[in-house]
Amino acid sequence: MPKLNHTVIEAAIAGFAQQKLQIDTQIAELRAMLSSGPTETATATPEATPGKHKKFSAASRRRMALAQKERWAKIRGEVTPPAPAVEMPKPKRKFSAAGRAAIVAANKKMWARRRAAAKAVTKKV
């Protein structure tokens, strides 16, 4: 058996500690699956990976903030101010008949060029 010096032993300890941490994390995840909720060991791991945060739009965050302010005002017994007027969304934009015709014509022109180019390539071969 080769001689083990101090640095080799320290490296082995660090490696085994890392493996132990990974195993503890996996055990905690499996326990959470069994109980359909997080366990105390899952929160005890110091290097737990952070969950992904869902991104909300500015309008959604504003609505959430207003709703939270209303809930707190209700708890404190304050009179809630009337809700601000809801902004109407912009009407959906539509193509005009001329715009649609221009797009159709451009597509026909493009496909005619592509067919001509493909025909030219096949004639060369």
Image (cartoon, grey):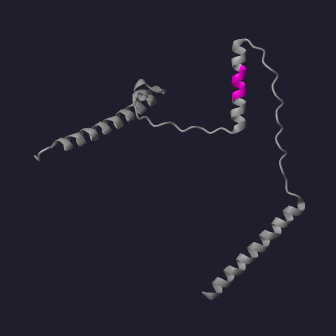
Residue 36 point in image, percent of width and height: 48, 27
Task: List the single residue furthest toward the bottom.
Answer: 124
What segment is highlighted magenta in the picture?
Answer: 65-70
Magenta span: predominant SS is helix
Q: Nearer the viewer, residue 51 or 83?
A: 83
Residue 27 against residue 78 in the figure, above or below: below
Q: Nearer the viewer, residue 21 or 61?
A: 61
Does 79 sit left or right of 44 as displayed?
right
Does 114 sit left or right of 27 as displayed?
right
In the rendered image, which quarter is residue 58 located in? top right
Residue 109 point in image, percent of width and height: 78, 74
Q: Residue at x 79, y 71 (%)?
A: 108
Residue 125 point in image, percent of width and height: 60, 87
In the rendered image, which quarter is residue 42 located in? top left
Task: List the single residue furthest toward the right.
Answer: 97
Q: Residue at x 11, y 45 (%)?
A: 3
Residue 52 included in the magenta stretch of the image: no
Residue 115 point in image, percent of width and height: 71, 77
Residue 99 against residue 53 in the figure, above or below: below
